[in-house]
Amino acid sequence: MFETILLAALILGAWYWFDSIAKREIAINHGRDLAARCHLQLLDETVACAQIRLGRDGRGHAQLQRFYEFEVSASGAERMQCSLQLLGKQLQSWHIPPYVQPMH
């Protein structure tokens, strides 16, 4: 019995690890797209999951809701803190603070 519980815990842990890696890649891609739309550069090494909780999609199904924080830069010198929220694989919300665009 103990071996079965241990095996199930290991499988669940491995699933969670791989799922977290996949969702971070999705968050990086969404962050990169959002930054490009705003003419900003995503500093992709700064993407980090800040919070995880259960959420419900439009059909009422429970899914993991992840909140990511990341940084972007308009000129390469300053950094701005931004965030996005994923429910499963879907982008739910995002925030990029107002900034002054550099003159070219």
Image: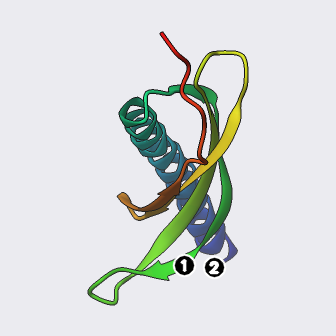
- Residue situated in front as seen by the camera: 93 or 25: 93
Position of 63 relative to 38 (above/below)? below
Kindly report which numbered mark, 1 or 2, lies closer to the viewer in this rendering.
1
Query: Horizontal and vertical percent for residue 84?
Result: 53, 54
**Side of 82 where 26 appears, left or right:** left
| Element type at mark 1 | strand
Q: Residue furthest bottom?
A: 60
Identified at 35% across, 80% down, the residue is: 57
What amino acid does circle 2 point to? Met
Quadrant showing the N terminus: bottom right
- Residue situated in front as seen by the camera: 65 or 97: 97
- Residue situated in front as seen by the camera: 48 or 34: 34
Q: Residue furthest top?
A: 104
**Side of 99 where 61 appears, left or right:** left
Identified at 43% across, 35% down, the residue is: 38
- Residue to which mark 2 is pinned: 1
In the rendering, which numbered label is found on residue 103?
none
Q: How many numbered dots are placed on residues in this image? A: 2
Identified at 54% across, 79% down, the residue is: 54
What amino acid does circle 1 point to? Leu
Task: Say which label, 1 or 2, has the lower sequence index.
Answer: 2
Q: Residue furthest left?
A: 59
Position of 87 relative to 68 (above/below)? below
- Residue to which mark 1 is pinned: 54
Q: What colour scheme has been applied to the protein in the rendered image?
A: rainbow
